[in-house]
Amino acid sequence: MAYLLALDQGTTSSRAIVFDLSGRIVALAQEPFEQHFPHPGWVEHDPMEIWHTQLATARAALEQAGLTAGDLAAVGITNQRETVVLWERSSGRPVSRAIVWQDRRTAELTDRMKREGLEAQLRAKTGLVLDPYFSASKLAWLLEDPGLRRRAEAGELAFGTIDSWLIWNLTGGRVHATDVSNASRTLLFDIHAGRWDDELLGLFRVPRAVLPEVHPSMGDFGSTDPGWLGGSVPIRGVLGDQQAALFGQACFSAGMAKNTYGTGAFLVMNTGTEPRRGDGVLTTVAWRVRDEPLHYALEGSIFVAGAAVQWLRDGLGLIKESHEIEALAASVASSEGVYFVPALTGLGSPYWDPYARGLLVGLTRGSGRAHIARATLEAIALQVYDAVHAMETAGVHLQTLRADGGAAANDLLLQIQADLLGRAVERPRVTETTALGAAMAAAVGADLADLPTLARAWQSDRRFEPAGDPEERARLIAGWHEAVARARGWAEGAGA
Protein backbone atom coordinates (compact mmCIF):
# COMPACT_ATOMS: atom_id res chain seq x y z
CA MET A 1 0.00 0.00 0.00
CA ALA A 2 1.26 3.48 -0.84
CA TYR A 3 1.43 6.30 1.70
CA LEU A 4 1.78 10.07 1.52
CA LEU A 5 4.07 12.21 3.66
CA ALA A 6 2.84 15.73 4.44
CA LEU A 7 5.37 18.25 5.70
CA ASP A 8 3.48 20.96 7.58
CA GLN A 9 5.93 23.77 8.33
CA GLY A 10 4.22 26.31 10.61
CA THR A 11 5.12 29.52 12.40
CA THR A 12 5.98 27.92 15.74
CA SER A 13 6.63 24.26 14.90
CA SER A 14 7.46 21.82 12.15
CA ARG A 15 5.22 18.79 11.76
CA ALA A 16 5.14 15.71 9.58
CA ILE A 17 2.09 13.49 9.10
CA VAL A 18 1.88 10.19 7.24
CA PHE A 19 -1.49 9.58 5.56
CA ASP A 20 -2.72 6.53 3.74
CA LEU A 21 -4.45 7.00 0.40
CA SER A 22 -7.87 7.17 2.08
CA GLY A 23 -6.77 10.24 4.08
CA ARG A 24 -6.40 8.39 7.38
CA ILE A 25 -3.60 9.60 9.69
CA VAL A 26 -1.03 6.86 10.23
CA ALA A 27 1.64 8.77 12.19
CA LEU A 28 2.39 12.31 13.35
CA ALA A 29 5.53 14.00 14.67
CA GLN A 30 6.04 17.61 15.75
CA GLU A 31 8.94 19.78 16.94
CA PRO A 32 8.82 23.42 18.05
CA PHE A 33 11.56 25.87 17.15
CA GLU A 34 12.78 29.15 18.59
CA GLN A 35 11.20 32.54 17.91
CA HIS A 36 13.60 35.51 17.74
CA PHE A 37 12.56 39.10 18.54
CA PRO A 38 15.74 41.20 18.10
CA HIS A 39 13.88 44.54 18.09
CA PRO A 40 10.31 45.68 18.78
CA GLY A 41 8.13 44.63 15.84
CA TRP A 42 10.80 42.29 14.43
CA VAL A 43 10.18 38.53 14.23
CA GLU A 44 12.81 36.11 12.93
CA HIS A 45 13.43 32.37 12.56
CA ASP A 46 16.64 30.42 12.02
CA PRO A 47 16.22 28.81 8.56
CA MET A 48 18.59 25.98 9.45
CA GLU A 49 16.54 25.19 12.55
CA ILE A 50 13.41 25.10 10.41
CA TRP A 51 15.09 22.66 8.02
CA HIS A 52 16.52 20.46 10.77
CA THR A 53 13.24 20.24 12.71
CA GLN A 54 11.29 19.50 9.53
CA LEU A 55 13.68 16.72 8.54
CA ALA A 56 13.65 15.30 12.06
CA THR A 57 9.85 15.16 12.14
CA ALA A 58 9.74 13.47 8.72
CA ARG A 59 12.12 10.77 9.92
CA ALA A 60 10.25 10.39 13.22
CA ALA A 61 6.86 10.02 11.50
CA LEU A 62 8.21 7.34 9.19
CA GLU A 63 9.77 5.48 12.12
CA GLN A 64 6.55 5.75 14.13
CA ALA A 65 4.57 4.35 11.19
CA GLY A 66 7.08 1.56 10.63
CA LEU A 67 7.60 2.68 7.04
CA THR A 68 10.53 3.41 4.76
CA ALA A 69 10.96 5.81 1.86
CA GLY A 70 10.01 2.97 -0.45
CA ASP A 71 6.52 2.91 1.06
CA LEU A 72 5.89 6.56 0.15
CA ALA A 73 4.16 7.48 -3.09
CA ALA A 74 4.90 11.19 -2.75
CA VAL A 75 5.70 14.11 -0.44
CA GLY A 76 3.47 17.16 -0.09
CA ILE A 77 4.55 20.46 1.49
CA THR A 78 2.49 23.15 3.18
CA ASN A 79 4.03 26.13 4.91
CA GLN A 80 3.73 29.39 6.78
CA ARG A 81 3.35 31.94 4.01
CA GLU A 82 5.17 35.24 3.30
CA THR A 83 8.22 34.41 5.47
CA VAL A 84 11.44 35.21 3.56
CA VAL A 85 14.72 33.29 3.32
CA LEU A 86 17.79 34.40 1.36
CA TRP A 87 20.66 31.94 0.93
CA GLU A 88 23.88 31.22 -0.98
CA ARG A 89 23.43 28.98 -4.00
CA SER A 90 26.94 27.55 -3.69
CA SER A 91 26.79 26.48 -0.04
CA GLY A 92 23.08 26.47 0.74
CA ARG A 93 23.77 28.62 3.81
CA PRO A 94 21.32 31.41 4.70
CA VAL A 95 22.82 34.90 4.66
CA SER A 96 20.55 35.99 7.52
CA ARG A 97 17.72 34.76 9.69
CA ALA A 98 14.35 34.36 8.01
CA ILE A 99 12.10 37.42 8.26
CA VAL A 100 8.73 36.13 9.44
CA TRP A 101 5.33 37.12 8.04
CA GLN A 102 4.48 38.78 11.38
CA ASP A 103 7.50 41.13 11.13
CA ARG A 104 6.70 44.86 10.81
CA ARG A 105 10.18 46.33 10.19
CA THR A 106 9.28 47.41 6.65
CA ALA A 107 6.26 49.53 7.65
CA GLU A 108 8.11 52.74 6.74
CA LEU A 109 8.89 51.41 3.25
CA THR A 110 5.31 50.33 2.55
CA ASP A 111 3.92 53.58 3.99
CA ARG A 112 6.19 55.56 1.67
CA MET A 113 5.04 53.50 -1.32
CA LYS A 114 1.42 54.18 -0.34
CA ARG A 115 2.13 57.91 -0.21
CA GLU A 116 3.60 57.62 -3.69
CA GLY A 117 0.24 56.27 -4.87
CA LEU A 118 1.47 52.76 -5.73
CA GLU A 119 -1.07 50.66 -3.83
CA ALA A 120 -3.78 50.67 -6.51
CA GLN A 121 -1.27 49.56 -9.14
CA LEU A 122 0.03 46.78 -6.90
CA ARG A 123 -3.44 45.60 -5.94
CA ALA A 124 -4.57 45.46 -9.57
CA LYS A 125 -1.79 42.99 -10.42
CA THR A 126 -1.40 41.05 -7.16
CA GLY A 127 -4.82 41.18 -5.48
CA LEU A 128 -3.07 42.18 -2.24
CA VAL A 129 -2.80 45.34 -0.16
CA LEU A 130 0.51 47.13 0.29
CA ASP A 131 1.58 45.89 3.71
CA PRO A 132 4.73 44.58 5.47
CA TYR A 133 2.86 41.26 5.87
CA PHE A 134 3.82 40.22 2.35
CA SER A 135 7.25 39.07 1.18
CA ALA A 136 8.47 41.74 -1.25
CA SER A 137 9.29 44.49 1.25
CA LYS A 138 11.14 41.98 3.46
CA LEU A 139 13.33 40.92 0.55
CA ALA A 140 13.86 44.58 -0.40
CA TRP A 141 15.00 45.28 3.17
CA LEU A 142 17.59 42.48 3.02
CA LEU A 143 18.87 43.75 -0.32
CA GLU A 144 19.53 47.21 1.12
CA ASP A 145 22.89 45.67 2.13
CA PRO A 146 25.17 46.64 -0.81
CA GLY A 147 27.13 43.40 -0.59
CA LEU A 148 24.03 41.23 -0.69
CA ARG A 149 22.57 43.28 -3.53
CA ARG A 150 25.73 42.85 -5.61
CA ARG A 151 25.71 39.08 -4.99
CA ALA A 152 21.96 38.84 -5.71
CA GLU A 153 22.33 40.63 -9.03
CA ALA A 154 25.21 38.31 -9.93
CA GLY A 155 22.99 35.26 -9.36
CA GLU A 156 24.93 34.05 -6.32
CA LEU A 157 21.94 34.21 -3.94
CA ALA A 158 18.55 32.51 -3.94
CA PHE A 159 15.32 33.89 -2.48
CA GLY A 160 12.38 31.85 -1.37
CA THR A 161 9.44 31.52 0.93
CA ILE A 162 9.58 28.55 3.29
CA ASP A 163 8.32 26.09 0.66
CA SER A 164 11.23 27.00 -1.63
CA TRP A 165 13.70 26.67 1.24
CA LEU A 166 12.44 23.17 2.06
CA ILE A 167 12.38 22.09 -1.61
CA TRP A 168 15.96 23.29 -2.06
CA ASN A 169 17.17 21.33 0.96
CA LEU A 170 15.09 18.23 0.31
CA THR A 171 16.42 17.98 -3.26
CA GLY A 172 20.02 18.65 -2.23
CA GLY A 173 20.02 22.04 -3.95
CA ARG A 174 18.89 20.67 -7.30
CA VAL A 175 15.51 22.44 -7.40
CA HIS A 176 14.82 26.13 -6.72
CA ALA A 177 11.05 26.43 -7.07
CA THR A 178 7.83 27.64 -5.52
CA ASP A 179 4.19 27.07 -6.35
CA VAL A 180 1.63 29.58 -7.57
CA SER A 181 -0.15 29.83 -4.20
CA ASN A 182 2.99 30.92 -2.37
CA ALA A 183 4.19 33.11 -5.24
CA SER A 184 0.88 34.97 -5.13
CA ARG A 185 1.65 36.13 -1.56
CA THR A 186 4.87 37.98 -2.41
CA LEU A 187 3.60 41.22 -4.10
CA LEU A 188 5.91 40.29 -6.99
CA PHE A 189 3.57 37.93 -8.88
CA ASP A 190 0.95 38.94 -11.43
CA ILE A 191 -1.99 36.70 -10.51
CA HIS A 192 -3.69 37.32 -13.87
CA ALA A 193 -0.69 36.44 -16.06
CA GLY A 194 0.54 33.77 -13.63
CA ARG A 195 4.18 34.90 -13.59
CA TRP A 196 6.74 37.13 -11.89
CA ASP A 197 6.21 40.69 -13.05
CA ASP A 198 9.07 42.95 -14.15
CA GLU A 199 7.23 46.12 -13.15
CA LEU A 200 6.63 44.80 -9.62
CA LEU A 201 10.23 43.63 -9.38
CA GLY A 202 11.33 47.12 -10.34
CA LEU A 203 9.19 48.80 -7.69
CA PHE A 204 10.85 46.72 -4.96
CA ARG A 205 14.29 46.63 -6.70
CA VAL A 206 14.36 42.84 -6.68
CA PRO A 207 16.68 41.24 -9.28
CA ARG A 208 15.08 38.42 -11.24
CA ALA A 209 18.21 36.30 -10.70
CA VAL A 210 17.23 35.50 -7.10
CA LEU A 211 13.74 34.22 -7.87
CA PRO A 212 12.60 30.59 -7.85
CA GLU A 213 10.78 29.02 -10.78
CA VAL A 214 7.01 29.06 -10.33
CA HIS A 215 5.40 25.64 -10.71
CA PRO A 216 1.79 24.45 -10.54
CA SER A 217 0.77 23.43 -7.01
CA MET A 218 0.28 19.84 -8.14
CA GLY A 219 3.19 18.75 -10.30
CA ASP A 220 6.88 17.92 -10.32
CA PHE A 221 9.10 19.56 -7.68
CA GLY A 222 11.91 17.02 -8.03
CA SER A 223 12.67 14.23 -5.58
CA THR A 224 14.21 14.07 -2.14
CA ASP A 225 17.90 13.37 -1.84
CA PRO A 226 18.26 9.65 -0.92
CA GLY A 227 20.30 10.55 2.15
CA TRP A 228 17.46 12.35 3.92
CA LEU A 229 14.79 9.66 4.19
CA GLY A 230 16.73 6.55 3.20
CA GLY A 231 15.55 6.69 -0.39
CA SER A 232 14.38 9.11 -3.04
CA VAL A 233 10.72 10.21 -2.86
CA PRO A 234 9.00 12.44 -5.44
CA ILE A 235 7.73 15.86 -4.23
CA ARG A 236 4.42 16.33 -6.03
CA GLY A 237 2.35 18.88 -4.11
CA VAL A 238 3.07 22.33 -2.60
CA LEU A 239 0.52 24.78 -1.12
CA GLY A 240 0.61 27.72 1.29
CA ASP A 241 -1.09 26.83 4.56
CA GLN A 242 -4.46 28.54 4.05
CA GLN A 243 -4.77 27.27 0.49
CA ALA A 244 -3.83 23.79 1.74
CA ALA A 245 -6.66 23.94 4.29
CA LEU A 246 -9.09 24.97 1.52
CA PHE A 247 -7.88 22.02 -0.58
CA GLY A 248 -7.99 19.65 2.40
CA GLN A 249 -11.62 20.66 2.99
CA ALA A 250 -12.35 19.68 -0.64
CA CYS A 251 -13.62 23.18 -1.45
CA PHE A 252 -13.07 22.66 -5.15
CA SER A 253 -15.87 24.76 -6.68
CA ALA A 254 -16.73 28.45 -6.61
CA GLY A 255 -18.66 29.48 -3.52
CA MET A 256 -17.26 26.77 -1.27
CA ALA A 257 -15.30 28.15 1.67
CA LYS A 258 -13.44 27.07 4.77
CA ASN A 259 -12.91 28.96 7.99
CA THR A 260 -10.15 28.05 10.41
CA TYR A 261 -11.23 28.91 13.95
CA GLY A 262 -7.86 29.20 15.64
CA THR A 263 -6.24 31.96 17.67
CA GLY A 264 -7.46 34.15 14.84
CA ALA A 265 -9.80 33.09 12.06
CA PHE A 266 -8.89 32.68 8.40
CA LEU A 267 -11.71 32.55 5.90
CA VAL A 268 -10.93 31.47 2.34
CA MET A 269 -13.52 31.12 -0.44
CA ASN A 270 -12.95 29.46 -3.79
CA THR A 271 -13.95 31.77 -6.67
CA GLY A 272 -13.14 29.38 -9.51
CA THR A 273 -10.95 30.28 -12.48
CA GLU A 274 -11.83 33.98 -12.34
CA PRO A 275 -10.14 36.32 -9.85
CA ARG A 276 -12.71 38.37 -7.93
CA ARG A 277 -12.29 41.52 -5.87
CA GLY A 278 -14.33 42.10 -2.72
CA ASP A 279 -14.50 44.97 -0.25
CA GLY A 280 -11.95 44.54 2.53
CA VAL A 281 -10.74 41.06 1.55
CA LEU A 282 -7.74 39.85 -0.45
CA THR A 283 -7.70 38.19 -3.85
CA THR A 284 -5.21 35.35 -4.05
CA VAL A 285 -4.31 32.27 -6.08
CA ALA A 286 -5.81 29.11 -4.60
CA TRP A 287 -3.85 26.54 -6.63
CA ARG A 288 -3.04 25.22 -10.04
CA VAL A 289 -3.27 21.59 -11.12
CA ARG A 290 -0.47 20.98 -13.64
CA ASP A 291 -1.13 23.10 -16.74
CA GLU A 292 -4.83 23.66 -16.05
CA PRO A 293 -6.06 27.25 -15.50
CA LEU A 294 -5.29 28.97 -12.21
CA HIS A 295 -7.89 28.70 -9.47
CA TYR A 296 -8.47 31.78 -7.33
CA ALA A 297 -9.80 32.56 -3.87
CA LEU A 298 -10.84 35.44 -1.65
CA GLU A 299 -9.28 35.58 1.80
CA GLY A 300 -10.31 37.31 4.99
CA SER A 301 -8.14 37.55 8.09
CA ILE A 302 -9.69 37.93 11.55
CA PHE A 303 -7.08 38.71 14.19
CA VAL A 304 -8.86 37.54 17.35
CA ALA A 305 -11.13 34.47 17.46
CA GLY A 306 -10.05 31.76 19.90
CA ALA A 307 -7.77 34.37 21.48
CA ALA A 308 -10.94 36.09 22.78
CA VAL A 309 -11.78 32.93 24.74
CA GLN A 310 -8.22 32.80 26.02
CA TRP A 311 -8.60 36.40 27.22
CA LEU A 312 -11.76 35.51 29.13
CA ARG A 313 -9.76 32.71 30.75
CA ASP A 314 -6.43 34.43 31.42
CA GLY A 315 -7.34 38.12 31.44
CA LEU A 316 -10.68 38.11 33.22
CA GLY A 317 -10.65 34.72 34.95
CA LEU A 318 -14.26 34.01 33.89
CA ILE A 319 -13.39 30.39 33.05
CA LYS A 320 -10.61 28.05 34.12
CA GLU A 321 -10.35 26.09 30.86
CA SER A 322 -11.20 27.24 27.35
CA HIS A 323 -13.60 24.36 26.71
CA GLU A 324 -15.81 25.54 29.61
CA ILE A 325 -17.08 28.46 27.54
CA GLU A 326 -19.55 26.34 25.56
CA ALA A 327 -21.53 25.13 28.59
CA LEU A 328 -21.40 28.58 30.22
CA ALA A 329 -22.64 30.33 27.07
CA ALA A 330 -25.35 27.72 26.53
CA SER A 331 -26.72 28.33 30.03
CA VAL A 332 -28.47 31.48 28.76
CA ALA A 333 -30.82 31.73 25.78
CA SER A 334 -29.21 34.93 24.48
CA SER A 335 -26.58 37.51 25.36
CA GLU A 336 -29.44 39.91 26.24
CA GLY A 337 -27.96 42.91 24.46
CA VAL A 338 -24.35 42.36 25.58
CA TYR A 339 -21.77 42.74 22.81
CA PHE A 340 -18.04 42.06 22.91
CA VAL A 341 -15.92 43.50 20.09
CA PRO A 342 -12.64 41.56 20.46
CA ALA A 343 -10.45 44.17 18.75
CA LEU A 344 -7.62 43.35 21.15
CA THR A 345 -5.05 43.84 18.37
CA GLY A 346 -7.17 46.00 16.08
CA LEU A 347 -9.65 44.71 13.49
CA GLY A 348 -8.79 42.75 10.35
CA SER A 349 -11.11 41.97 7.41
CA PRO A 350 -13.11 43.78 6.29
CA TYR A 351 -12.30 46.82 8.47
CA TRP A 352 -8.48 46.80 8.52
CA ASP A 353 -8.43 49.18 11.49
CA PRO A 354 -5.24 48.94 13.59
CA TYR A 355 -6.60 51.63 15.92
CA ALA A 356 -9.74 49.73 16.94
CA ARG A 357 -9.72 48.42 20.50
CA GLY A 358 -11.71 45.85 22.46
CA LEU A 359 -15.15 46.89 23.67
CA LEU A 360 -17.65 45.27 26.04
CA VAL A 361 -20.98 47.12 25.82
CA GLY A 362 -24.65 46.69 26.69
CA LEU A 363 -24.08 45.60 30.28
CA THR A 364 -26.86 45.89 32.86
CA ARG A 365 -27.25 44.78 36.48
CA GLY A 366 -28.67 41.55 35.10
CA SER A 367 -25.60 40.78 32.98
CA GLY A 368 -23.38 37.94 34.17
CA ARG A 369 -20.54 35.64 33.20
CA ALA A 370 -22.78 33.59 30.91
CA HIS A 371 -23.91 36.61 28.90
CA ILE A 372 -20.30 37.71 28.34
CA ALA A 373 -19.37 34.15 27.37
CA ARG A 374 -22.19 33.96 24.84
CA ALA A 375 -21.36 37.43 23.51
CA THR A 376 -17.80 36.20 22.94
CA LEU A 377 -18.92 33.23 20.82
CA GLU A 378 -21.30 35.52 18.95
CA ALA A 379 -18.43 37.96 18.32
CA ILE A 380 -16.32 35.24 16.70
CA ALA A 381 -19.23 34.25 14.46
CA LEU A 382 -20.18 37.85 13.69
CA GLN A 383 -16.65 38.65 12.53
CA VAL A 384 -16.85 35.70 10.15
CA TYR A 385 -20.28 36.91 9.00
CA ASP A 386 -18.76 40.31 8.15
CA ALA A 387 -15.95 38.69 6.16
CA VAL A 388 -18.40 36.46 4.24
CA HIS A 389 -20.57 39.51 3.46
CA ALA A 390 -17.47 41.34 2.17
CA MET A 391 -16.61 38.39 -0.08
CA GLU A 392 -20.11 38.27 -1.51
CA THR A 393 -19.67 41.85 -2.75
CA ALA A 394 -17.35 40.23 -5.31
CA GLY A 395 -20.34 38.48 -6.86
CA VAL A 396 -19.72 34.96 -5.51
CA HIS A 397 -22.39 33.54 -3.22
CA LEU A 398 -21.35 31.34 -0.30
CA GLN A 399 -22.58 27.77 -0.80
CA THR A 400 -21.12 25.94 2.17
CA LEU A 401 -18.81 26.86 5.01
CA ARG A 402 -16.51 24.10 6.25
CA ALA A 403 -14.98 24.65 9.67
CA ASP A 404 -11.65 23.56 11.12
CA GLY A 405 -9.26 24.72 13.84
CA GLY A 406 -9.40 24.19 17.59
CA ALA A 407 -12.55 26.26 18.25
CA ALA A 408 -14.48 24.28 15.62
CA ALA A 409 -14.98 21.63 18.31
CA ASN A 410 -17.45 24.06 19.92
CA ASP A 411 -20.93 22.98 18.74
CA LEU A 412 -22.63 26.12 20.01
CA LEU A 413 -20.22 28.37 18.11
CA LEU A 414 -20.87 26.53 14.84
CA GLN A 415 -24.64 26.62 15.37
CA ILE A 416 -24.48 30.38 16.00
CA GLN A 417 -22.39 30.67 12.83
CA ALA A 418 -24.93 28.76 10.75
CA ASP A 419 -27.78 30.87 12.16
CA LEU A 420 -26.02 34.13 11.32
CA LEU A 421 -25.01 33.10 7.81
CA GLY A 422 -28.29 31.40 6.96
CA ARG A 423 -26.15 28.65 5.44
CA ALA A 424 -25.04 25.24 6.67
CA VAL A 425 -21.71 24.87 8.45
CA GLU A 426 -19.91 21.53 8.23
CA ARG A 427 -17.17 20.12 10.43
CA PRO A 428 -14.95 17.43 8.85
CA ARG A 429 -14.11 14.08 10.33
CA VAL A 430 -10.38 14.68 9.71
CA THR A 431 -9.49 17.98 11.41
CA GLU A 432 -5.83 18.10 10.28
CA THR A 433 -7.01 19.83 7.14
CA THR A 434 -3.83 21.78 6.31
CA ALA A 435 -1.59 18.71 6.31
CA LEU A 436 -4.33 16.68 4.63
CA GLY A 437 -4.46 19.31 1.88
CA ALA A 438 -0.72 18.93 1.27
CA ALA A 439 -1.07 15.14 1.13
CA MET A 440 -4.07 15.36 -1.22
CA ALA A 441 -2.17 17.79 -3.47
CA ALA A 442 0.72 15.32 -3.61
CA ALA A 443 -1.71 12.53 -4.50
CA VAL A 444 -3.09 14.59 -7.40
CA GLY A 445 0.42 15.53 -8.51
CA ALA A 446 1.45 11.87 -8.46
CA ASP A 447 -1.63 10.81 -10.49
CA LEU A 448 -3.02 8.82 -7.57
CA ALA A 449 -6.24 10.83 -7.31
CA ASP A 450 -8.28 13.54 -8.99
CA LEU A 451 -10.46 16.28 -7.55
CA PRO A 452 -13.83 14.50 -8.02
CA THR A 453 -12.47 11.45 -6.19
CA LEU A 454 -11.17 13.59 -3.34
CA ALA A 455 -14.46 15.47 -3.12
CA ARG A 456 -16.35 12.20 -2.71
CA ALA A 457 -13.87 11.03 -0.06
CA TRP A 458 -14.34 14.11 2.16
CA GLN A 459 -16.31 13.10 5.26
CA SER A 460 -18.47 15.25 7.49
CA ASP A 461 -18.41 14.81 11.25
CA ARG A 462 -21.45 17.04 11.77
CA ARG A 463 -23.56 19.47 9.76
CA PHE A 464 -25.10 22.51 11.47
CA GLU A 465 -28.25 23.76 9.72
CA PRO A 466 -29.39 27.37 10.15
CA ALA A 467 -32.27 27.87 12.56
CA GLY A 468 -33.56 30.64 14.80
CA ASP A 469 -35.69 33.74 14.37
CA PRO A 470 -34.81 35.98 11.36
CA GLU A 471 -35.78 39.09 13.33
CA GLU A 472 -33.46 38.12 16.19
CA ARG A 473 -30.68 37.52 13.66
CA ALA A 474 -31.19 40.98 12.12
CA ARG A 475 -31.23 42.60 15.57
CA LEU A 476 -28.01 40.84 16.59
CA ILE A 477 -26.20 41.89 13.41
CA ALA A 478 -27.39 45.51 13.66
CA GLY A 479 -26.31 45.76 17.29
CA TRP A 480 -22.95 44.25 16.42
CA HIS A 481 -22.30 46.85 13.72
CA GLU A 482 -23.21 49.61 16.17
CA ALA A 483 -20.74 48.19 18.69
CA VAL A 484 -17.99 47.89 16.04
CA ALA A 485 -18.55 51.51 15.03
CA ARG A 486 -17.93 52.57 18.64
CA ALA A 487 -14.75 50.45 18.89
CA ARG A 488 -13.19 51.69 15.63
CA GLY A 489 -10.45 54.31 15.76
CA TRP A 490 -10.38 54.25 19.57
CA ALA A 491 -6.57 54.39 19.87
CA GLU A 492 -6.46 57.48 17.65
CA GLY A 493 -8.55 59.51 20.11
CA ALA A 494 -8.64 60.27 23.81
CA GLY A 495 -8.99 56.59 24.65
CA ALA A 496 -5.47 55.81 23.40
Image (cartoon, rainbow, N blue to C red):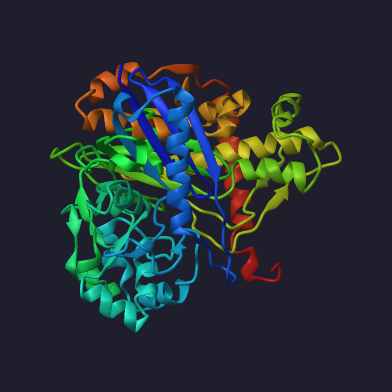
Q: Position of residue 346 (x, y in %)?
A: 58, 58
Q: Residue furthest bottom?
A: 146
Query: Could you say which is closer to the camera, residue 460 or residue 141?
Result: 141
Horizontal relation, residue 133 to residue 447: left or right: right
Residue at point 49%, 58% (across, down): 352
Q: Is residue 128 above or below residue 116?
A: above
Tell me where residue 494 sits by quadrant.
bottom right
Residue 252 visible in the displayed image: no
Q: Position of residue 476 (x, y in %)?
A: 61, 37
Query: Could you say which is closer to the camera, residue 170 or residue 272?
Result: 170
For the N terminus, the image quarter is top left
Q: Residue furthest right?
A: 365
Q: Residue furthest left?
A: 291
The total number of labels drawn is: 0
Residue 457 visible in the displayed image: yes
Q: Is residue 309 above or below residue 126?
A: above
Query: Could you say which is closer to the camera, residue 215 or residue 270?
Result: 215
Horizontal relation, residue 285 to residue 145: left or right: left
Horizontal relation, residue 209 to residue 63: left or right: left
Horizontal relation, residue 309 to residue 162: left or right: right
Q: Position of residue 44 (x, y in %)?
A: 51, 62
Residue at point 68%, 45% (across, down): 340
Residue at point 64%, 56% (across, down): 486
Tell me where residue 394 sits by quadrant.
top left
For the C terminus, the image quarter is bottom right
Q: Position of residue 311 (x, y in %)?
A: 71, 46
